[in-house]
Image (tube, rainbow, N blue to C red):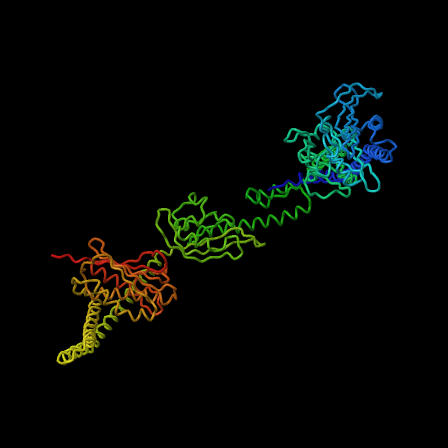
Amino acid sequence: MKKSLGVLLAFGLAGLQFVAVLAVVFSSYVTSERALIEHARDLLRDVGINTIEHSKGFLSPAQGAAELAARLAQNEVISSDDSQLLEKLLFQQLQITPQFAGVYYGNEAGNFVMVMRNIDGIAKFRTKIITNDGLGRTTELIWRNDDFSVAKHVFDPADSYDPRNRPWYLKAKAELTTIWTDPYIFYSSKQPGITLSAPVASGADGFRGAVGVDIEISMISDFLSRLNIGANGKALIIHSNGDVIAHPNAALIKTQSDDGTLRFANIREIDDPIARVAFGELGYEGKERITKETPSDFIHAGSRYVSTVMPVISEQLPWTIAVYAPEDDFTAVIKRNRTMNIWLAALVAMATGAVGLALADYIYRPVRAFAVRTALVSQGELDPDEPLPKTYKELERANAALVQQIVARREAEHEYGQTFNMASRGMAQTSADTGLIIRANARFREIAGYDAADLEGKTFADLLCPEDVALWHKTSAPDSSDFGRVQELRLVRKDGVILWINVNAFVIRDSRGKPLHAVLTVDDITQSKSSESQIERLNKDLSHLARGNTMGQMAAGLAHELNQPLTAIAQNADTALLVLDQNAQDDRELRDILAEIEQQSLRAGGIIRALRSFIKKDEGARVAFDFPVLLSQTLQLLQAEATDARVTIETEIAGEIPKVLGNRVQIAQVIVNLLRNAIEAIAGAEAEERDIRILVRREGDKLRVSVEDTGPGVDPSINLFSQFETTKPAGMGLGLSICRSIIEANGGELGNEPPQGRGAVFWFTLPVYQFA
């Protein structure tokens, strides 16, 4: 990228000014913001403490009133059995304590006196008196005005209320101390409340009854709604079970249960999404009780909030005060101030930049003239000897040195270009990054058959045979430090002709070792490769001919040398049979042995004569014979070899097998070769399954014979039926090739197919004998 020095100077000066102002603005902002956040946390803590004290002050009169009434009843200052006097006492307590919703007393006899605030409009207060005198139970309902006068008085024989079964009574009786129930929604008034109960003792450990006080706590929510916690902050009270019992919006704390009754909303379900995010974990059962003030911060809907959770008020009131407020309520002013300061900094920087640009243009004008002159000299549009423009002395000296370098470089590039274009070898430049051909000389284009336009957008790999592309990419990339190649590859000319080329590739680097481009030199070696191939084929033919002559001589010598002892063996066996016929005692087992010796000696002579005939390209006599009989005889010859190798040979003959037409000895030689190959393969593999299976079946006018083994299989790199191809250390590579020639000479085919499991499968066919 080209950069203007004048613009850089201007922007540099303006940028320095802008950065300096921003540094001052942000340092001041960070310091102020930190102080305000600490102030916000102090405010939240003070709100929490204030709420705790207010809650204690709100509830402590109830505890004092209940305990006073209990002591009066306990000390019989007011007889707990005198319902009228007890009603007056409770009535007075209810009048002087506005947060009380009701005050009541119940005893072990089931007697009950309750005075509560009335909401049906008949009178301001309502009394309920239950009397159990041993003869029966009566329930009175009395509505009273502020002066204790009766507004209405009725009896309710259907009432079944028994204080002795209520939680406040049972808990006070069990613990014999002042107790608080969990907050709940009062059934009659539908307002949130809590019940306090104090026992009335009888003697040292006796229990006479309990005094209870119902306290509406909705005024705590009113108190929270009047708190000023920033502009949008809120405080709420959460019970130990996660229920929200006080909230600035009192309507949010009540929700309906499945049975239709009202209950407190849990912090995890309250319709205050910010409170759910801030304090939702307080609603899980098993959550440890908060024992110390816990400040935190969180993000909701892209805004940052601060929050504080206060420790529980007491063991009797396990309430947690939770307060949250947006940071912007405390930092919005300094954020607006910061934004204003940034705009001021930008305006100052722009003004400074304009002045700097004018100053830089004045300084840069001689430099620009020098740069233009250098570019014109580099492009050859200006003579280097032209006089210099008026500029700085330092630039004049630099200009002289630079012009000399430019002239020298242009001369070197000209010489290199002529050498590149006129070279007798094909040459091409490729990009070190992409491998694309940058340019190619005439000889390269002649070899490839492309002109300069055709080579645009092509890589050298695009010109190669698809099979050789992997060889080219297998070496290191052109931009690596060890790149360098000398390879023989095949190139596909534009007209489709495939050429053999010799490629020499290397990388040109700059003084720092960075690759600039790669240079390829290419020579057409198609003619030399063709000559080498012809010489190789000629050597192979001569070698084959020499081996064939040697084997022919060996076969002739062996046939001549072995025929005489085999003839002698056959004659001696025949003589022994004649002597045995003249002997009075007929030894059947000895006769069979001598007959087998005679038969096998004659068969050995036949094999030798057939082999000699095959090497001499003599097809031999083709006759009709019974193939299963020949297979049985051949297996007898290989049984000892198979037993030594611990190999089992199984034969399966499918259906009735007709006679086949062929040279019996040559076919036996093929069977022996295939079976011996299978035995040697299994013996060398040390396989657990060591089996050979021979399947014989008729297929139309052919007899098909398959030999399947459990050896290691066929090496895919070996051309099975090529001469001199072998995997055996001492093999000549002629067995399968000769076997195929024998089978084809007898009118059949020999091949290999993949097995169902491991091992190898070889098969051959023979023509079925057709009766005339």
Residue 234 image position (x, y, % from top left):
75, 32
Q: Nearer the viewer, residue 210 or 595?
A: 210
Q: Quadrant of residue 7?
A: top right
Up-down: is 571 above or below 377?
Answer: below
Residue 219 image position (x, y, % from top left):
78, 28
Q: Quadrant of residue 566?
A: bottom left
Is 436 on the left or on the right of 120, as rendered? Answer: left
Residue 752, visible in the rendered structure: yes
Up-down: is 446 above or below 145?
Answer: below
Number of residue marks? 0
Q: Nearer the viewer, residue 136 or 731?
A: 136
**Image quadrant for the C terminus?**
bottom left
**Image quadrant for the N terminus?**
top right
Residue 352 image position (x, y, % from top left):
73, 35
Residue at 38% across / 65% down in the picture? 685
Q: Nearer the viewer, residue 744 or 316?
A: 316
Q: Furthest residue to the right?
A: 77
Residue 24, visible in the rendered structure: no
Q: Quadrant of residue 227?
A: top right
Q: Nearer the viewer, residue 147 or 521?
A: 147
Is 116 on the left or on the right of 6, as rendered? Answer: right
Is 139 on the left or on the right of 396, as rendered? Answer: right
Up-down: is 745 above or below 608?
Answer: above
Q: Furthest residue to the left?
A: 772
Residue 414 image position (x, y, % from top left):
50, 49
